[in-house]
Amino acid sequence: MNAFIDPSNTEKYLELTKPIAEEFRKHPENLFTAISVNPTDLGHVRIVHGWTKDSTWFQEVIPNLPFES
């Protein structure tokens, strides 16, 4: 996923996405989750994650999981 945000909000956006990435990483089906900021465009944040299951599984299962707060 690519997110394009006001560069002044990058740190705040990263703080908001960090708990989601941490929850993804807890699942045995998760191969990796990475969040990166384009060093030449601080308003461009990319979130990438891979799973041992297909997209249909992800769309059916992940949105229904309880996330810890």
Image: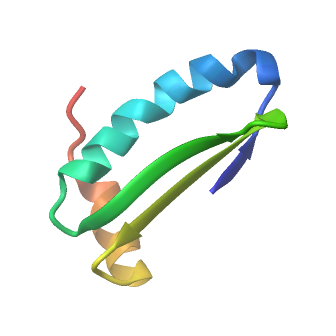
**Residue 2 percent location from the top left of the image:** 69, 53
Q: In the picture, residue 50 is in which quadrant?
A: bottom left
Q: Nearer the viewer, residue 36 or 47?
A: 36
The residue located at (30%, 81%) in the rendering is 53
Tell me what residue is drawn at x 27 percent, y 57 percent.
64
Is 31 on the left-hand or right-hand side of 12?
left
Count of residue discs: 0
Image quadrant in which you'd find residue 63:
bottom left
Q: Is residue 13 above or below residue 63?
A: above
Q: Is residue 16 left or right of residue 19?
A: right
Q: In the rendered view, tell whether residue 10 sits above or below residue 20.
A: above
| Residue at figure coordinates x 27%, y 64% from the top left | 30
Residue 25 location (% of width, % of height): 26, 51
Q: Is residue 43 left or right of residue 29?
A: right
Query: Which quadrant: the C terminus?
Result: top left
Q: Residue at x 54, y 28 (%)?
A: 14
Figure check: 59 above or below 11: below
Picture coordinates of residue 35 (x, y %)?
A: 52, 44
Q: Position of residue 67 (x, y in %)?
A: 24, 40
Pick out the residue farthest to the front. Answer: 39
Q: If the image is split into quadrants, where does the N terminus sit? A: bottom right
Vertical side of 65 occupied by 4: above or below: above
